[in-house]
Amino acid sequence: MILSIGDLLLDITIVPDGPLRPDDDRPASIGLGGGGQAANFCAWTAALGEPVRLITRVGDDERGRRLVSDLEARGVEVCAVWAAEPTGAIAVLVAPDGQRSMASERGASVGLRPDDLLETWFGGVKLIHVPAYSLFVDPLGMATRAAIGFIREAGGMLSIDLSSVAGIKEYGAAKMAYDLARLQPELLFGTAGEASTIGVALEQLAQVPVIKLGSAGCSVFGRRIPAPEVQHVDATGAGDAFAAAFCTAWLHGAAPIEAAERAVIVASGAVTRAGARPN
């Protein structure tokens, strides 16, 4: 069993048919779907055939109930804390080259507390995957650290994704580096920009640091693993697909390079379609 903790949100994906025109209209494809980095990771993990569980706090509203039902239909076990606050949402604007700009309202998710966690949610978990978004803001950050503690006590492994350059800067790069040094994740994922923002070599902070390079693939221990050439449509969720494939392969005994080779293939497939999750 793999576990993740954090956001389950609504994604509003906007793909214009060309550059936006200031103060004017532009035809676009607009889609609604499930989002949130922790939830997306779980959706991809389930699609790869691995048992996976999500701990999340979500609004007790129609949006939240639909998002939970959709994730469960994908094979994810959802441990939901229902809240009075509304379920959050992310607006994702996709540029013609597939790059994204995002505006987020995290809603109920950041209110998850340590005393919301149930012991039964951690049974059988071999690895917990934590988006750094789940560490940036309390009380969710406190709940996430408590969850990591439960997994560590049971002998499980830790995977962390650095998530966001802006998030790291707002949280504090030195503080993030200190947290990583204390948490000692086996796996650490980040883009080149996120790794640079931390300001400490990732090799000092994790057993296996992995630099995600987008369409160029990834780098593990200085070795470059290229990605296959594909037609880029939307990169939303590709990093989560990458992490899910890497963690799954790692749990099944793959060496880091082998896990990375699997991960770049899965992530390359993810960018060929709009939306953050597998079909």
Image (tube, rainbow, N blue to C red):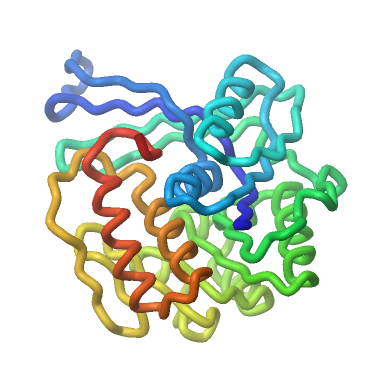
**Residue 270 image offset from top left, x and y in percent:** 30, 46
Q: Is residue 124 above or below residue 224?
A: above
**Residue 176 image offset from top left, x and y in percent:** 59, 68
**Left or right, 67 with reference to 139:** left
Residue depicted at 16% across the width and 43% down the height: 97
**Left or right, 15 with reference to 55:** left
Q: How many marks?
A: 0
Residue depicted at 70% across the width and 36% down the height: 57
**Residue 56 image offset from top left, x and y in percent:** 67, 40
Q: Is residue 176 above or below residue 206?
A: above
Q: Image quadrant of residue 277?
A: top left
Looking at the picture, tell me which residue is in the foreground, 236 or 85. 236
Q: Is residue 201 above or below residue 22?
A: below
Looking at the picture, tell me which residue is in the foreground, 171 or 139. 139
- Indicate the quadrant containing the C terminus: top left, top right, bottom left or bottom right: top left
- Indicate the quadrant containing the N terminus: top left, top right, bottom left or bottom right: bottom right
Residue depicted at 58% across the width and 41% down the height: 76
Residue depicted at 62% across the width and 24% down the height: 64
